[in-house]
Image (tube, rainbow, N blue to C red):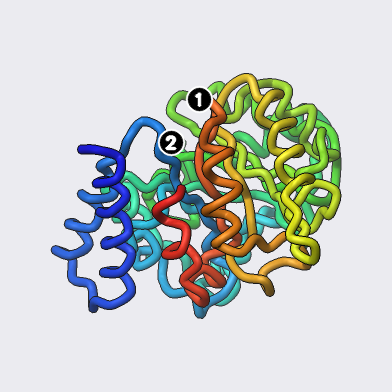
Amino acid sequence: MKAHETQDFRLRQAKMARNLQLTPLVFSLLFLMTLIKTSHAGSIATYWGLNVSEGNLSTTCGTGIYAYVNLAFLNVFGNGQTPEINLNGHCNSASNGCTFLSEDIKFCQKYGVKVMLSIGGLVGNYFLASPNDAENVATYLWNNFLGGNSSSRPFGDAILDGINFDIQTGSTQYWQDLAKNLKSHSNVYLSASPQCPFPDNFIGTALDTNLFDYLWVQFYNNPQCQYDFSNSNTTNLISSWNRWSSSLKVGKLFLGIPAAPQAAVSGYVPSQVLNAEILPLFRKSPNYGGVMLWNRYYDELTRFFATILESV
């Protein structure tokens, strides 16, 4: 299938997702079309779990738009704390109320969507006190969300594809130890969401391990390395992308942007600028992976994905 034909499929798929009352059969057809990719085409990642109005997880995956969904967030862990998940009204893991997500996660994975647990976030209480603490956290993640065994798995028997590091507060040390311990297990994908100033203050050392499969860099809320909306200037964004791209030894690099102006303090990129000036250039990077849209709620609200789907 030629590239333009694949893009046509994906755009029609997005329109179907908007307009149809989806049945399991339609879901399946959408995913079959999604899986037809060209070698240079990128993918879309997003975050789910931040607003109950964003819809359920299976519907998110059922749009056929996203190749990666981060469940956000595990925002309390480390330093001897009892880990806590905050999915903002979707469910309460403290009362064992999130196990129903097991079937949603399996639904996503059945059709090739990688589902990852995002640890950290802007608001939370997480901290790694030592290499041993990092090892303990890795063991907890493996046993409770990945391929290990535990009697108290928050998402039931679903096995997530990996862990996303969204570290924006707390300690700046030992994240490389956490990454190494997680990667010691087979079939565990690691992604990270560093801020665009290079190197990232919190996980720059962890990224130097070259253990991460995907980086969805946050090119927003940082004027020095994002799109300048007020002046319609792409200079800082392009310069920062090139710095990240040239420094990345392994894995795929994603352009992390807000899915709506209100989704971030700054850094929103209008779709016409993204399609005409930015993505055609970024797609030339050998490690280009696609776009990360922050977040599913705002993407659903604005249908931003539909305006960029052909260009990703």
* x and y, in percent, of residue 293 in the image: 56, 57
On-image quarter of the N terminus: top left
Q: Which mark is residue 53?
A: none
- In the rendered view, would you say 136 is above or below 9? above
- In the rendered view, would you say 299 is above or below 21? above
Q: Is residue 235 visible?
A: yes
Residue at left offset 37%, top offset 49%: 157
Q: Amino acid at mark 1?
A: His
Q: For this rendering, which residue is in front, 261 or 300?
A: 261
Residue at left offset 67%, top offset 39%: 137
* x and y, in percent, of residue 32 in the image: 20, 49
Q: For this rendering, which residue is in front, 144 or 33?
A: 33
Residue on which the image places disc 2: 147
Which image quadrant is residue 35 in?
top left
Few, some or many residues within 10 Å of mark 2 (<14, 14–19, 20+): some
* x and y, in percent, of residue 187 in the image: 43, 28
| 155 horizontally vs 183: left or right | left
Which image quadrant is residue 39 in?
top left
Residue on which the image places disc 1: 185
Q: Is residue 76 visible?
A: no
Residue at left offset 56%, top offset 41%: 163
Few, some or many residues within 10 Å of mark 1 (<14, 14–19, 20+): few
Which image quadrant is residue 25 in?
bottom left
* x and y, in percent, of residue 75 in the image: 69, 57
Q: For the image shown, how many numbered marks are present on the structure?
A: 2
| 72 horizontally vs 147: left or right | right
For the residue labelled by badge 1, is the local secondary structure a helix, a strand or a loop? loop
Residue at left offset 24%, top offset 38%: 2
Whether tag 2 and tag 1 are in contact, CB under 8 A, the answer is: yes
